[in-house]
């Protein structure tokens, strides 16, 4: 089972403050399309992968990030992996 079950959706969202560091966390919600954020790039994808693997031992494939659009969709996809 993926370790995402140890992280609530709200905690998951808050972790993106460390990744999208130029975007105010208050402007993010579970329904935010992360690909629409100004900071979105392939480097952000690598940062997401590294952050969650290092902090929570959660392995996220790049395809999972690219195949989803909102933080909620991403959380759901990781939960089902």
Image (spheres, helix red, strand yellow):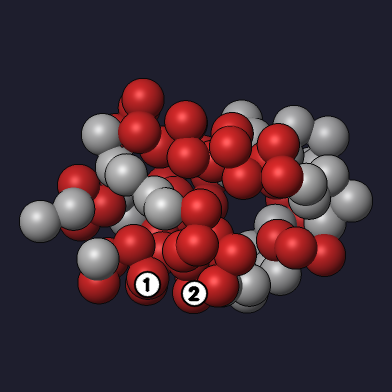
Q: Position of residue 80 (x, y in %)?
A: 25, 72
Q: Residues within 10 Å of mark 1 (few under 14, many from 20)?
A: some
Question: Disc 2 on helix, strand or loop?
Answer: helix
Residue identifier under label 2: 73
**Left or right of 48, for residue 44:** right
In this rendering, does residue 17 appear at all? no
**Left or right of 53, for residue 15:** right
Placement of 24 over or under 29, stated as above or below = above
Q: Which residue is drawn at 54% across and 41% down?
A: 48
Placement of 46 over or under 75, stated as above or below = above
Quadrant (top left, top right, bottom left, bottom right) of the N terminus: bottom left
Q: Position of residue 4 (x, y in %)?
A: 26, 52
**Res. 56 image quadrant:** top left
Q: Residue at x 69, y 68 (%)?
A: 32
Q: How crowded is mark 2: few (under 14 residues within 10 Å), some or many (20 or more)?
A: some
Q: Residue furthest left?
A: 1
**Left or right of 5, for residue 14:** right
Question: Disc 1 on helix, strand or loop?
Answer: helix
Placement of 9 over or under 6, stated as above or below = below
Q: Do the residues labelled 1 and 2 touch (CB within 8 Å)?
A: yes
Residue identifier under label 1: 76
Q: Residue at x 60, y 64 (%)?
A: 66
Q: Which residue is drawn at 62% across and 45% down?
A: 45
């Amino acid at each position: 089972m993926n370790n995402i079950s140890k992280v609530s959706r709200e905690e998951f969202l808050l972790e993106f403050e460390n990744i999208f560091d130029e975007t105010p966390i208050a402007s993010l919600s579970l329904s935010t399309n992360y690909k629409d954020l100004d900071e979105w790039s392939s480097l952000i994808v690598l940062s997401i992968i590294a952050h969650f693997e290092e902090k929570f031992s959660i392995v996220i494939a790049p395809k999972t990030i690219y195949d989803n659009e909102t933080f909620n969709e991403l959380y759901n996809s990781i939960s089902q992996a």
